[in-house]
Image (cartoon, rainbow, N blue to C red):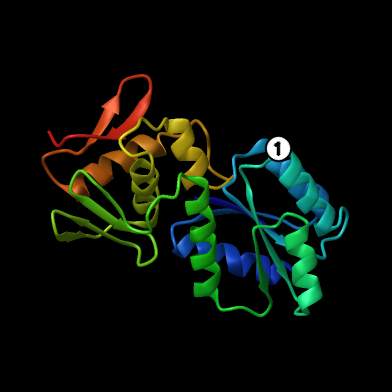
Amino acid sequence: MRVLVAEDETFLAEAIRAGLRQEAIAADLVHTGDDALEAITINDYDVLLLDRDLPGTHGDEVCRIVVAEHPSVRVMMLTAARQLDDKVTGLGLGADDYLSKPFEFPELVARLRALVRRNIDAKPPVLELAGIRLDPFRREVFRDGSYVKLSRKEFAVLEQLMLAGGGVVSAEMLLEKAWDENVDPFTNTIRVTVSNLRRRLGTPWVIQTVPAVGYRIGDAR
């Protein structure tokens, strides 16, 4: 999952990004409405975590534009406003969810994952495929009933492959969804991460390489 955090409080924005990374969620930061709109046109985000009171283009207008022009991006409003009218207004603009500050971080993560599930053909909360069981909320992976310890990036890559349901996922898509904007697009990090992931999952190999296309989870071999 990849999230764009649009928040003008620098300390809070950095704290959110750090927390999301701990949950194997890639996150980029912007601090103005104008920068949020620009970033949305450049990268393929799953969720926009949007502070309503952004400088520059107001968060309300950002929400309207994103809903109209980028319908695949889910919008969660994040604001200090607690009044019911504010929440109704935010949802009326097209936001998919609304969370008031201060908030509990586990709730934020749970809501983000719930939003993403809506975007991918109502996938179940726990993903199961080819003997692998992945629980995004507990960040746990089992293969044939045995626990598999993964790094955050390995977990993020495996989650994208599981979400594809056996379909091929390109290296570019894995880079887009599991890493933030600071990654070098010419790096071999995808190949290395997939190689490490294969070893951690054990034999027979369940992650297949589709030459010149990408990777998929298929029959163990």
Q: Is residue 116 left or right of residue 216?
A: right
- Identify which residue, 56 or 135, lies in the foreground: 135
Residue 112 lies in quadrant:
bottom right
Is residue 19 visible from the viewing direction of this image?
no
Is residue 147 visible from the viewing direction of this image?
yes
Category of crowding for the residue at label 1, using alpha-carbon neighbours closer than 10 angstroms: few (below 14), some (14–19), many (at least 20): few
Residue 164, relative to residue 29: is it above or below? above
What residue would you read off at disc 1? 41
Q: Is residue 61 left or right of residue 219?
A: right
Please provide percent x and percent y for residue 153.
39, 51
Please provide percent x and percent y for residue 208.
25, 31
The residue positioned 53% from the left and 65% from the top of the image is 111
Q: What's under tag 1, amino acid-wise?
A: Thr
Residue 143, relative to residue 188: is it above or below? below
The residue positioned 56% from the left and 78% from the top of the image is 104
Please provide percent x and percent y for residue 202.
15, 47
Numbered marks: total: 1
Question: In the orientation shown, which residue stands out farthest toward the right?
Answer: 56
Q: Is residue 192 left or right of residue 80?
A: left
Q: Quadrant of the C terminus?
A: top left
Please provide percent x and percent y for residue 21.
49, 60
Question: In the orientation shown, which residue stands out farthest toward the top?
Answer: 212
